[in-house]
Image (cartoon, helix red, strand yellow):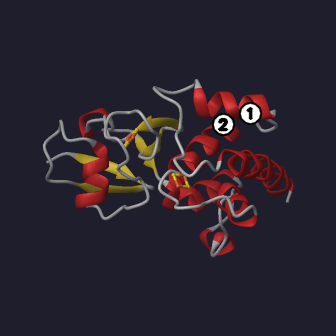
Amino acid sequence: MPRITVNDVEREVSASPDTPLLYVLRNELDVMTPKFGCGLAQCGACSVLLDGEEVRACITPIEAVAGKAVTTVDGLPARWAKQRGLSPQQAAGKLHPVQQAWIEEQVSQCGICQFGMMIKITELLEQNAKPSDADIKAALTTSGPSPHLCRCGSYAAILEGAQRAAKLMAQGAEA
Ligand code: FES
Ligand code: FES
């Protein structure tokens, strides 16, 4: 049976190797933050990190993630703690800066797109700690198979959230 590693836990799954990761996460592993939007790599609602790079889980077969690390929004706090060298005790109850920023800026409206947005911004901030607004817009529109879409039109709030996350991340990195 295929084995995949999701949020630092290796799991054995019963799905066939060509099954899209999104279906396995949601239907078999009960990891519900990646959302089904279009199913065609056209919206970004299903995005996860694969070895730190954003991929669209709706078109990524599980055979393509073998031996790699899948991170969903659920795994961001532990990812941030590990990057800062914190123990599980020190990290307990702490959110990733992107999650914290999303709350502080009240970014989400219906929320369907937002987990993919947070994944994309996490990928960006891990590569570019001080992005300009243009960098953020480019990440969300031109760096993947399609733009990340928000039917609620929360793009301005997403921009604010990303900039706040960059500040929180810088503060956290110094702490
Ligand atoms: S559901 Fe995967 S990109 Fe839309
Ligand atoms: S918050 Fe509703 S689709 Fe983006």
Q: Residue at x 44, y 35 (%)?
A: 55
Q: Position of residue 33 (x, y in %)?
A: 44, 59
Q: Nearer the viewer, residue 22 or 172?
A: 22
Q: Position of residue 112 (x, y in %)?
A: 47, 56
Question: Which quadrant of the rendered structure holds the C terminus?
Answer: bottom right
Q: Which residue is mark 1?
A: 128
Mark 1 C-beta closer than 8 Å to ligand 1:
no
Q: Which residue is mark 2?
A: 124
Quadrant hosting ligand 1:
top left
- Relative horizontal placement of residue 22, taking residue 91 as reference (left or right): left
What is the three-letter code of the residue carrying label 2? Leu
Q: Nearer the viewer, residue 175 or 130?
A: 130
Contact, mark 1 vs mark 2 (Cβ under 8 Å): yes
Q: Residue at x 31, y 40 (%)?
A: 39
Establish if 116 lies above or below 104: above
Q: Nearer the viewer, residue 101 or 2?
A: 101
Q: Secondary structure at mark 1?
A: loop
> How far apart in space, not on screen, are marks 1 and 2 (Cα)?
6 Å
